[in-house]
Image (cartoon, rainbow, N blue to C red):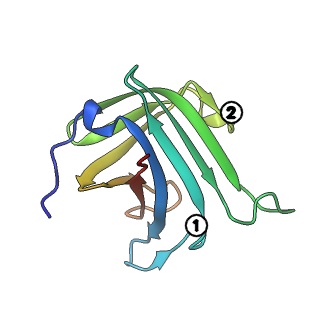
Amino acid sequence: MADAEVNESRLYGSWDLQRWRRIAADGSVTLPHTDNGRGRIVYERSGRMAAFLVHPDWPAPGLVNGFTAYSGPFKVEDGSVHHMVDFASQPSMVGKDLVRKVTLRGELLILEAAAIDEAAARHELEWRRVTA
């Protein structure tokens, strides 16, 4: 199936996390939230978005980043979606422009972002559109 051209209106609605992969520079793959991580991302017609990611073991003692939530305006530009964070569970995220390469493949939304801890590593999150 060919990838669809992406604009804001193609993103409207709710999407559930299907898979989150971290791909290292050497090509090795890990699952930051195991195979059972949960998440939802919502893109509103108002131009705002909200994302929630939950590790299956959250809350667990010592679990770092077991829950992440953020919200703010969004826009699609040059094959990427920009999440302009104005509200977040982690204060360091507020004011950031989180840029994700965006691909639509049928009912799947794939967001890719560079990893901050390793050059040439990336995160790939696959979301499925929520239907009624």
Outermost residue, front direction? 132
- Residue 93 vertical position relative to residue 73 in the rendered view, above or below: below
Type of amino acid at the residue the image marks with label 2: Pro
Question: Measuring 81% from the left and 57% from the top, which residue is drawn there?
Answer: 59
Q: Secondary structure at mark 1?
A: loop
Other-residue count near label 1 (Cα within 10 Å), few / some / many at <14 / 14–19 / ≥20: some
Other-residue count near label 2 (Cα within 10 Å), few / some / many at <14 / 14–19 / ≥20: few
Mark carried by residue 91 = 2
- Residue 66 vertical position relative to residue 13 in the rendered view, above or below: below
- Residue 55 vertical position relative to residue 73 in the rendered view, above or below: below
Image coords of residue 26 (percent x, y): 38, 78
**Residue sitting nearer the eye, 15 or 99:** 15
Image coords of residue 108 (percent x, y): 32, 56
Type of amino acid at the residue the image marks with label 1: Pro
Mark carried by residue 32 = 1
Q: Is residue 4 left or right of residue 13?
A: left
